[in-house]
Structure formats: C-alpha cells, structure tokens
Image: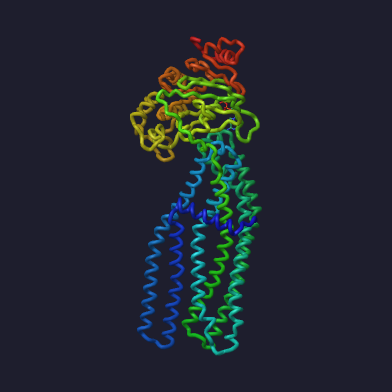
Amino acid sequence: MKRMSMQKRISVTARGFAILKQYCPGLAQGNAFYELVHSIQPFLSVWFTARIINELSAQRRIRTVLGYVLGVVLTNFVCAVLKSIVKRVCKEKESQMWGWFGKIFSDKQMALDFVDLERAAIQHQRQKAEENLYMFGNGLAELVWGTSTLVRASVNLLASLAMTVSLFVSKSGNRAVDHPIWILIVLLCIVSGGLGNSKATIKVNEVFLKWCEDTVWFNRVFVFFGSALYRNQEKAKDVRIYGQTAIAENELDQLIQHERENQGDLFKMSVYPALASVLIGLANAVCYLFVAAKALSGAFGVGNVVQYVAVLSRLGEGLQELMYILSDNEVYCIHLQNLFEYLDLPNHMYQGSLTVEKRDDNEYDVEFRDVSFRYPNTDTYALRHVNLKFKVGEKLAVVGRNGSGKTTFIKLICRLYDPTEGEILLNGVNIQKYDYDEYRSLFSVVFQDFRLFSLGLGQNVSASAVYDSEKVRACLKKAGFAERLASMPDGLETFLYKDFDTDGVELSGGEAQKLALARALYKDAPFIILDEPTAALDPRSEYEVYSKFNEIAGDKTAIYISHRLASCRFCDNIAVFHAGQVVQTGSHEELLADRSGNYYELWNAQAQYYTIQNH
Ligand code: ADP
C-alpha cells in the first residue's frame, strides 16, 4: 500500500469535510454530537452508580443517596431526550446522504467535456471513485462515520483516564500492591492491547485496499453482464434473439470463479482481528486482577471497584479506536483522493468568455478553416482538412456515404468536440473563445441517436418542468405529431414509457423522431440541425417533413444531413462528404452538372431505387 503523508491526509480530510458541508450540511456535526452524548452517558451513569454503592456500603446517608439517584436519573433523561432529537435529524440526513453523494458524480459527469465521456481511462477513474463510495462505504461516508468514531474514542479516552486516576494514586497500605511498577504494567497492558488491535486493523486495511483495487474490474464486468445486459430494455430484444445470455452466463461464471479464488483475502481479514482480541482479553485480565488486589488491600470501596472495572476496558477501547481511526483515515483518504482526482479533471470547454452576439436577423457566419479531427483513442481521422464556409440563414445540406464524417461535422459545429487541427469560426472568431453555454444555446439538434425521457410529453418537448402548452402544441403540429397527440390519454401530461407511470405510452421509432423534431423546434435556437431526421419515418411522414422543411426551419440556419439526396434539393447549398473530406459544394443543379463528381454518382445510384421527379 502506498503510504500517504500525514500532511496530505490532513488536507484530503479537510477537503472531504468541505464537500460534505456543501452537499450534506450538518450531517457530520449532527452525528458527532449524537456520539458525544451517547458516549458520555455511560460514564456519568457509572460515576453516579459507584457513588451510590460507596454510600450504601459505608455511611448510608439517605439524602446523599437520593441526590446521586436524582443525578443519574436526570442525566440519563437529558441524554435520552437529546439523543432522540438528534438521532431523528441525523437519520433523515443520513438516508439522503447516498443520494447527495450520487449527485456529486452526476454534477461532475455533466460538467465533464463531452469528449471525456468517451475516454476509457476517465470513465474508469469515475468508476473507481464511485465504487469506493457505493460498494465499500468509503470516502465521504467513512468520513462521516469516522468523525463519530473520533468523538467516541476521545470521550472514552479522556473520561476513562479521569475516572481511573484515583485507581493509580490511591494507597492501600500494602507495599507490594502499591508499588509503582503495577501502574506501568497495567498501562503497558492497555497500550499493547490497543496497539495490537490497531496493528491488526492496519493489516486488514492493507488486504482490503488490495481487494478494492482488484475488484474494480470485476464490478465493471459484473454490472455489465449481470445488470446492463439483462435489465436494459433497449438491449433485451437483441439479447433474446441472438441468445446472448449464454455469453453473459459464461462471463459471469468465470468472474464468480475468480472471486472465489480471492476468498483467501477475506479469511486474512478476519484472522488479524481475532488475534488482537486474544491480546485484549489478556490485557483486561491483568487490569481486573490489579483492581481486585487493590480493593482487597482496602485501597477503595466496592463502588470504586465497579467504576474501575467498567471504565478500564473503555480506556483500552478508546486507545484502540484512536489507533483504528488513524489507520482507517489513511484508507479513506486514499479513496477520497481517488474521488478528488476525478473531480479535479480539467474542463477545457469552459475557458472561453466572449458573449455570443445576439442577432435579430439570425445572420451568423460559420467557417471551418482546415479542420481535421480524430476521435479519442483512435488513430484515423474522421475529418480531414475540411474547409467550408456558410452564411447562416441559409439551408445547408450535408450528404455522403455512411461513415463519411457528416455527424462528426455536426458534433464539431456544436462544440461537443474541439478540432484536432484547424479552427472553426463564428462571425470570424474562433468558437473556443465564446462562453461555452452561450455558444451551445445557439443550436437545436436532432441527432440520429436522440433520446427521449420517461417524463410527460410536454416536458420532453420543452426540456423543462414548466412549459408553454400552446408553443408545445404548435411545435408538435409542425413536426407532424398533431394526430398522435389527439389520441394521447392525458394530452401533454401523458407520460412516455412505463418507467414512472404504468399508463405511460410507448412510441414507434417514427413517432419518437417527430417528438425529437418538436423538441428542437421548441428550443427556438438560431441554428437547427437535423441528422437524418426522416430515417425512421414512413414515406408519407417523410414527404411531409421534406415539403414543410422550409416552414419548419423558418428563417433559421438549417443544416440537414441526409443520404437521401432527393430530400436535399431544396437546400441553398449542398456539401458532399467523402472519407472525411468535403469533396464538392454547390446547389443541386451545379453538383449534378459535374458528371465526374461524387454527387452525380450518388444521385444516379439512388435514382435506380427511387422514382425521383423534377430533378
Ligand atoms: P456519418 O455521419 O457520415 O455516417 P460519422 O461522422 O458518424 O459518419 O463517422 C465518421 C467516422 O468516424 C467513421 O469512420 C466512424 O466510425 C468514426 N466515428 C464516429 N463516431 C466515433 C466515435 N465516437 N469514436 C470513434 N470513432 C467514431
């Protein structure tokens, strides 16, 4: 195990508390206060009980006994009331704690650069930090619990020291029993019991950390095969048709076998604490013998015997817990460190600060200047030396074979990725210089693999909890969804899918595509980009979208990707992509006139399958 310096541990722990304060304010403090009261209470009871026994076995003054009885009853009452109030609040907060911890991850995941979502190393880093949190309760949760343990250990140590001082200083008159060597022996027993236990804990933690490391991969594969594959409805069709359960079961069997072979580690984890318990038992025995010898020699009364016997074991416990916390702190500091490394991943997209000029005429000007792009973890360029200028307000069609780079071109315009080489300019300024959120707000995109959510229809279209119903209806109508809307049982309130509402509706691919189009229209951004917007539509709906495209796009800049060339004729400009490059640009007529061009070839290839009129 790589050790972490004490200074580093302090700064990591402090940052852990800062995160707790931000996401779960008051939780650690509440738990610590509960533990303070909870651990002081038995000491107070023991103290009062010892006084009562002493009084009963000696002077038997009734008023003094009653005073102590009242004292013990009152302190227990106050402690019980305080504990029940604080516990209620803490339980509530602790039950929400996991949700808040989940939010830390979703906040970061949302803020990550889009490109990082595809980087395997970064997603592995997230998973490592996340698993530390959920599977082993380490990191932040451990910090909450560790704070309580620290309070308990401190109370145990301080209170038991205070209540055992008289054991060591009181004299019995018997020189053998009063000899100072006994103090040394008893303290040594207590300390060695505590140290033995802490040594065991350190060993357990070492094994545990190694186990955690080994388990990250196991969990990832297990979750994929055990959960994603079986439970994921989207994959369920293919899993069944192609009998992929056999592959999953084979993988799961192998993983379970691997885990069985690692069970030895778990055995080691239980052996160390068992050995430590034996040591503690021996230490306790010596302490009890010492107390008994002193009491028999007449150093103190029966009440004090009760007090020392009850408290001495707590002294050992306090010491053990303190050692345990120091060692445990190192473990969860390592897990916290994993979390912080993930949270500190830099964000490159948000470095620009320029405001995007808001233009009433929507006349933006976009230029790709010698842009090349490679996806992360790949060696081949998806786009190569793309030079393209288009005046916004125009309708641009992007055509080309599958894999020619059309979607990649769109992702770069929206700045989901930055070019590997070259630059993209908006109104003459590199788009990286603009405020990222503002820049993104310029685009409404319907991606080929768009997703709708298990929410109400209106919320899906508006992407918001509160929406303008009339505007939603108008957008749905424009997108050709009016008829289907009329059949929805609860109108715009109808839930999509059945995740949250058993009456939720399932949509066909074409219906979903229309909804996605309506969502793009509702956003009302100056750019509207449609990536194969009719791929899932039947011929009639496809024809509707084509014929209404100018109406749908209005005065917006529209970029329209299609490999159905007939649908691109109404665009002012057509860019033909081939193997990541723009090989031709021009109007439909211009492109068709070039008989050696790519467009002519594509057009003729398609003409064999479609009846294309008016070309
Ligand atoms: P088109 O939209 O023209 O069908 P794409 O832009 O989707 O083409 O893809 C262009 C090339 O980039 C293809 O070779 C594809 O395999 C590759 N590609 C697309 N997305 C990714 C990705 N996320 N990671 C790696 N390569 C990708």
**Residue 560 at x, y percent in the picture:** 49, 22
Residue 33 % position (x, y): 44, 63
Percent of width and height locating residue 315:
53, 72
Is 277 placed above or below 544 here? below
The N terminus - image quarter: bottom right
Residue at the extreme left of the image, as rendered: 470
Q: Is residue 472 visible?
A: yes
Q: Specify whether 571 is left or right of 180.
A: left
Total marks drawn?
A: 0
For ligand 1, the image quadrant comes to top right
Lateral position of residue 165 relative to residue 221, left or right? left
Question: What's the colour scheme?
Answer: rainbow
Q: Residue at x 46, y 26 (%)?
A: 527
The residue nearer to you, when weighing 40 against 165, is: 165
- Asked which quadrant contains residue 518, the reply is top left
The residue shown at (59%, 37%) is: 244
Position of 366 relative to 598 (above/below): below
Residue located at (49% from left, 73% from top): 159
The residue positioned 63% from the left and 60% from the top of the image is 267
Q: Is the residue 274 above or below the residue 336 in the image?
A: below
Specify whether residue 404 is in view: no
- As drawn, the residue found furthest toward the bottom would be 173
| Location of residue 95 in the rendering, given as x and y in whole percent from the top left corner | 44, 54
Q: Nearer the viewer, residue 297 or 259?
A: 297
